[in-house]
């Protein structure tokens, strides 16, 4: 079976960032469980899905996603000053920490703390992989039809469709 919309894909991948000819390992599933996702419903980067579309169990592919096709370029205006009184109840974060935030519409996201002063906490709202060129090596472990329940829920329920039951 080939990867198409509404199939459940199990794959192993290794992800590196590229800086010219230099590769830096970000993560790999080869020593853990494969990544399992419902293809074509927006769970993965669209260009990632485009590169694995049509592959079948046992096939491999290597591809590069430029920043505009991955997590975008770094947006310098996405660095904000947060008032220190926001942290009175939870405690002051340290530079480098990733903190959970919520906007006025209730959407949750994360920010990386750049600097802490007595007056403000400077936080970077860019995705941690913004501005990065991503190099993927993927191996398709399995492809199967999604169950009706997975389609209704909009996500995979594990490699065999029963996870969480």
Image: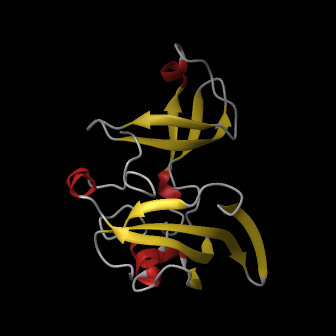
For image coordinates 48% across by 56% down, the residue present is 77
Give coordinates of residue 75: x percent, y percent. 50, 61
Q: Quadrant of the N terminus?
A: bottom left
At 52% from the left edge and 38% from the top edge, which residue is drawn? 81
Depicted 44 relative to depicted 165: above or below = below
Q: Is 110 left, or right, of 49 in this rendering?
A: right
Image quarter of the C terminus: top left
Task: Name the side, left or right, on which 135 lies relative to 89.
Answer: right
Q: Residue at x 48, y 71 (%)?
A: 142
Q: Position of residue 117 (x, y in %)?
A: 67, 29
Tally of numbered discs: 0
Task: Using the rendered view, name the quadrant where residue 101 is placed.
Answer: top left
Q: Quadrant of residue 99?
A: top right
Determine the residue located farthest toward the top in the rendered image.
Answer: 89
The colour scheme used to paint the residues is: secondary structure
* Position above or below: 122 against 87: below
The residue at the point 20 percent across, 53 percent down is 152
- Image location (x, y in percent) of residue 107: 33, 41
Q: Position of residue 111 (x, y in %)?
A: 53, 43
Quadrant in the rendering for residue 5: bottom left
């Amino acid at each position: 079976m080939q990867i198409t919309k509404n199939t459940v894909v199990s794959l192993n991948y290794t992800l590196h960032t590229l800086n010219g000819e230099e590769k830096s390992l970000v993560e790999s599933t080869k020593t853990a469980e494969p990544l399992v996702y419902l293809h074509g419903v927006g769970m993965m980067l669209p260009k990632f899905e485009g590169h694995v579309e049509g592959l079948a169990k046992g096939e491999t592919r290597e591809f590069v996603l430029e920043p505009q096709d991955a997590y975008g370029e770094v947006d310098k205006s996405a660095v904000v000053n947060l008032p220190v009184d926001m942290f009175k109840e939870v405690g002051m974060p340290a530079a480098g920490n990733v903190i959970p935030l919520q906007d006025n519409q209730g959407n949750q996201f994360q920010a990386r703390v750049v600097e802490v002063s007595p007056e403000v906490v400077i936080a970077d709202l860019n995705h941690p992989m913004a501005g990065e060129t991503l190099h993927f090596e993927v191996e398709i472990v399995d492809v199967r039809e999604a169950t009706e329940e997975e389609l209704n829920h909009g996500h995979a329920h594990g490699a065999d469709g029963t996870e969480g039951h």
